[in-house]
Image (cartoon, rainbow, N blue to C red):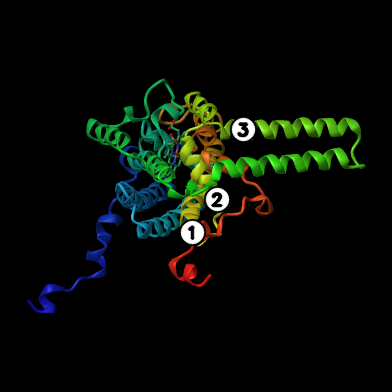
Amino acid sequence: MNNETKYSSIHYNSYLQVDKITSAQQLRSDEVGTHAHDEMLFIITHQVYELWFKQINFELRSIVKDFSARQVNEKNVGIAVARLERVIEIMKLLVQQIGVMETMTPLDFLDFRNYLFPASGFQSFQFREMEVMLGLKENRRTTYNNKPYHCVFASDKKDALEDLEKGNSLFDLVEDWLERTPFLEFGAFNFIFEYQKAVHSMLEKEKTAILDTDILSDESKQMRLIMLGDTNTYFSNIMDEKRHNALIAEGKLHLSYKATIAALFINLYRDEPILHIPFLLLSKLVEIDDHITTWRYRHAQMVMRMLGKKVGTGGSSGHEYLASTAAKHHIFADFHNVSTLLIPRSELPVLPDSFKRNLGFYFSALNT
Ligand code: HEM
């Protein structure tokens, strides 16, 4: 087979199926009512979102697949970081696109809104796939009308979402991966023991600084010492495995004790070459959570502007429901919590040289 037959010529239009895409905008106002100019923008904006959701889910699916291996290939961690970076850039666009939608005024929207009932963004299958793949669990969702979020789908889509829920999400897989971090104990060095010592010494220094200062009144000193006591309780709550598990049972935490310690270790020693990529991975997940939350807030604000106190076409309370999802539907919040546990570099337990060499890349280890 020569190259000419193998690669038959292709045209821009047929390759991208442009005709299919550009003929997929049927205005409901034309079909059942009076033509509403802004409906075209409404349809195209939603379609563009769905295309981006497709790309995001494509990236997430590939990362979930790579992280499902019993031992995650180091190379795949770097690839995951690059793909999550892509997802983040797309998510920035998703937030920006709300501005395009908002060029339609509430009055323009009323020209065709009635024709849309009972369709709603609540029925976006790909949006749900994205949430589930990232790790949003059914029991952590705000619901409306006391019905599960997937009740709006036909049975095949509902089954697909239930299957996806049964499998491992990115949250679950990263948690497993963190739990397998091999560095938490190395010879005589026990990270958690050394870390607790460092926290204790840091808090003692802060206590001495409060007591010794001439600037604060006795009353203010007392208040600061109480606050310092709270910090201490926070550190010890998180550091005690039993208490950590109790907080998980209460639904206040979600990331396992072991994975939290590993995430803390990676954050504290991220300057060590071997921990740099794992640190980037955790940062990207937090960033994704931030962007989805920003989108949820922006979308809720837009809905407030468009609808005021009106209920949604899907039957929810509209803005109120959406604002509660923005406040509640965080997926990687426990990775944010790790920031509370960070201590200054100056207080970090010094890693033994032999350990440091193990954390360096082969080349740098040879040259130190
Ligand atoms: C005029 C513009 C829009 C209005 C007034 C609006 C309104 C609403 C309302 C009221 C809901 C809550 C469910 C319901 O009762 O219907 C909702 C949910 C949703 N909308 Fe929109 N929306 C708009 C644009 C968009 C766009 C451009 C997208 C992009 C895909 C979108 C995606 C979603 C999604 C994914 C949900 C489900 C959110 C969740 O349950 O967490 N919406 N929308």
Q: Which residue is situated farthest in the front direction here?
A: 188
**Can residue 72 be seen by looking at this rendering?**
yes
C-alpha span from label 2 to label 1: 14 Å
Quadrant in the rendering for residue 158: top left
Q: Secondary structure at mark 3?
A: helix
Residue located beneath label 1 in the image:
359
Residue located beneath label 3 in the image:
236
Q: Amino acid at mark 2?
A: Asn
Mark 2, Cα crowd under 10 Å, few <14 / some 14-19 / many 20+, is many
Front in this rendered view, residue 188 or 333: 188
Vertical comparison of 265 with 19: above or below: above
Q: Position of residue 89 (x, y in %)?
A: 47, 57
C-alpha span from label 2 to label 3: 18 Å
Residue located beneath label 2 in the image:
267
Q: Secondary structure at mark 2?
A: helix
At a point 56% along the width and 54% down the height, the residue shown is 269
